[in-house]
Image: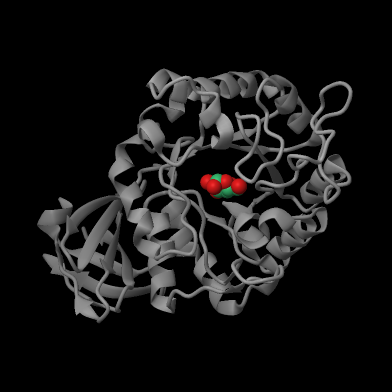
């Protein structure tokens, strides 16, 4: 759980932006709900053309927006938070900044020395290095960095980013990956894009997660200037978005403007019972139990024997969505609790059929009644 700079700051990200994000993670209360990682995305290194890219010993150089990386992570750590950084296995990052090709070990040691606790490793220009499209070539750069990180004397979460190529979910964990993007960039698209991620449920487990990209709500980039513009998705779609990520046990990484968080956005990001669904120790990724043209239902087993069920409506009007105990492999009366409203709805015998708002969700937890 954390925040990433990409979808609000892109190539204008600075040390000060990162510090302000850390401050806001505390001030808004997000940290109290488990948000912890404050992650720089692309564009902190030197841009192609802006030589030198490395010092005389080959140590990678930050650009003028990042005067002192160690001071930055010290600041983030002083708030009780963790810091993340980004690079590519290719010679250049996706936005054309220095990558780690042929400096993998040296860069990993530099990131550890700077105090970074998280590394996003983004394929980008590795396209020009890979000799062919075999699995061997897809795995190679990630296995190399995975091995290096294992031997670095500092814990670094390993975030693999290559947009789902070559069924990354099948092999990412074997390279030491802790989470891996299963999809292309989400951009400012609809909340249901992440549903593609649902089919990979069997590959998720504690320490190894399918990642359908960031939570884009509140103020996100796209306009001119650094403020961003408000999300175009409706409040009900925002509930659906956060519910889907939670029930899929996906990384919860917000990537909007931390300094313009309104109460509604904070409430979407910080509902204790929704986050409990996402963070449940069993670590099961929910899966689709039922789907048609207008709706789908995901369910996730919780460690305590209860089940979280998300009833999603993809139609532009409110419709009833039904789930029978048969579809969920449960039997007997169930006490149903509405997680967004944090309210018990009573006991249900065989099925549940709420009216679900347009492009929205009803997220409930079923507790077997003895
Ligand atoms: C790729 C990644 C994004 C972001 C950008 C940065 O597109 O998928 O998440 O990191 O690169 O350039």
Q: Is residue 11 above or below residue 152?
A: below
Q: Is residue 257 left or right of residue 167?
A: right
Front residue (pair 360, 300): 360
Q: Is residue 175 left or right of residue 319?
A: right
Q: Percent from the top left, x then y, of residue 187?
A: 49, 59
Quarter of the image with the C terminus is bottom left
| Of the pair 68 and 342, the residue shown nearer to us | 68
Residue 344 in picture, x, y percent from top left: 33, 73
Against 251, residue 100 (above or below) is above
- Which residue appears at 57% of the width and 51% of the height? 1
Q: Look at the image and tell me whether residue 174 can be seen.
A: yes
Answer above or below: position of 133 versus 303. Answer: above
Number of marks in the rendered image:
0
Q: Residue furthest front?
A: 49
Q: Nearer the viewer, residue 342 or 254?
A: 254
Q: Is residue 359 above or below residue 169?
A: below
Q: Residue at x 14, y 66 (%)?
A: 351
Image quadrant assignment for residue 328: bottom left
- The coloring applied to the image is one colour
What residue do we see at 66% from left, 42% from top? 96
| Residue 132 drawn at (x, y percent) | 43, 21
Residue shown at 56% from the left, 72% from the top: 218
Residue 77: x %, y % from top left: 78, 46
The residue lying toward the viewer, choosing from 82 and 275, is 82
Give left or right: position of 55 versus 264: right
Residue 330 visible, this angle: no
């Amino acid at each position: 759980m954390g925040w990433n700079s990409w979808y609000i700051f892109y190539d204008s990200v600075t040390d000060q932006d990162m510090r302000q994000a850390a401050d806001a993670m505390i001030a808004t209360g997000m940290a109290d709900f488990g948000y912890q990682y404050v992650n720089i995305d692309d564009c902190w290194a030197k841009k192609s053309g802006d030589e030198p890219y490395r010092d005389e010993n080959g140590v990678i150089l930050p650009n003028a927006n990042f005067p002192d990386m160690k001071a930055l992570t010290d600041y983030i750590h002083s708030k009780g938070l963790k810091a993340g950084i980004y690079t590519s296995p290719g010679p250049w990052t996706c936005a054309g900044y220095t990558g780690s090709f042929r400096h993998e070990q040296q860069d990993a040691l530099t990131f550890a020395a700077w105090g970074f606790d998280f590394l996003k490793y983004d394929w980008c220009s590795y396209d020009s290095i890979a000799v062919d499209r075999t699995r061997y070539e897809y795995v190679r750069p990630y296995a190399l960095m995975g091995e290096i990180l294992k031997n670095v004397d500092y814990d670094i979460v390993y975030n693999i980013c290559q947009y789902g190529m070559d069924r990354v979910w099948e092999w990412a964990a074997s390279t030491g990956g802790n989470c891996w993007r299963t999809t292309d960039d989400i951009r400012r698209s609809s909340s249901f894009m992440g549903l593609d991620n649902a089919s990979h449920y069997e590959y998720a487990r504690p320490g190894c997660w399918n990642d359908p990209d960031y939570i884009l709500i509140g103020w996100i980039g796209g306009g001119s200037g650094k403020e961003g513009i408000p999300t175009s998705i409706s409040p009900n779609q925002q509930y659906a978005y956060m519910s889907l990520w939670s029930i899929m046990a996906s990384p919860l990484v917000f990537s909007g403007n931390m300094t313009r968080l309104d109460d509604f956005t904070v409430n979407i990001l910080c509902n204790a019972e929704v986050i409990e669904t996402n963070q449940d120790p069993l670590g099961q990724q929910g899966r689709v139990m039922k789907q048609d043209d207008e709706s789908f239902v995901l369910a996730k087993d919780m460690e305590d024997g209860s089940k979280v069920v998300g009833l999603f409506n993809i139609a532009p009007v409110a419709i009833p969505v039904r789930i029978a105990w048969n579809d969920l492999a449960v039997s007997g009366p169930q006490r149903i609790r509405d997680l967004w409203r944090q309210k018990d709805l009573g006991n249900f015998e065989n099925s549940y059929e709420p009216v679900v708002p347009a492009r929205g969700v009803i997220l409930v937890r079923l507790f077997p009644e003895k």
